Image (cartoon, rainbow, N blue to C red):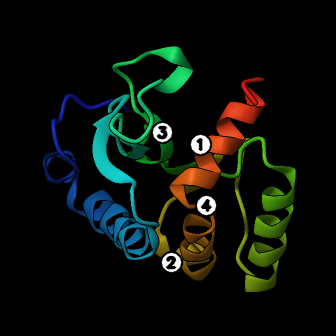
Amino acid sequence: MPSDAKTATEYLANLPAEQRKELSAVRSVIKKNLPKGYVETMQYGMISYVVPLKLYPAGYLGKKDVPLPYLSLAAQKSHLALYLLNVYGHPALERWFKTAWSRSGKKLDMGKSCVRFKTADALALDVIGEVVAKAPVKDFVERYESGRGRR
């Protein structure tokens, strides 16, 4: 559910203890594996990792005041969610991700970019760490622009 929190710390502090614990565990994996250049912020009411405007001034969807989102983490009404925008629209990375996840023995509950979960233990955290690390800012921006017909 969208939050009015201004920081990730405030967002987590406003959650029930169990959700805070689970999201904090996933956040830790993200931060440990996040390529240089991305920054943690709040976007669309979720903890988000974005390409800052100083690195990509064109902005998301051409909005010069909205940083390009890379990943987001949120507590929804009936589940927790990790939005892997680096996987969305990237068939090769999606195949790699699903294959690696399958090898983990964990059940994957995923939409186009959203991995739904109840606990961090239900996730293949090593696979999440790897997929987070797989897209340096430059590569992610190039793929985003290519998908929007800008290259």
Residue 17: x %, y % from top left: 21, 61
Amino acid, disc 2:
Asp
Residue to which mark 3 is pinned:
69
Label pair 2/4, CB-CB below 8 angstroms: no
Depth-wise, is mark 2 or mark 3 nearer the camera?
3
Sequence-wise, the earlier of marks 3 and 4 is 3
Above or below, 136 against 129 in this view is above
Secondary element at image label 4: loop
What whole-number distance in Å separates the C-alpha atoms at marks 1 and 2? Answer: 31 Å
For residue 76, the mark is none
Residue to which mark 4 is pinned:
135
> From the viewer's perspective, is 146 left or right of 79?
right
Please identify the quarter of the rendering in which residue 19 is found. Answer: bottom left
Residue at image position (40%, 65%) is 36
Q: Look at the image and tell me whether residue 123 can be seen.
A: yes
What whole-number distance in Å separates the C-alpha atoms at marks 2 and 3? Answer: 25 Å
* Crowd around label 3: few <14 · some 14–19 · many ≥20 (10 Å): many
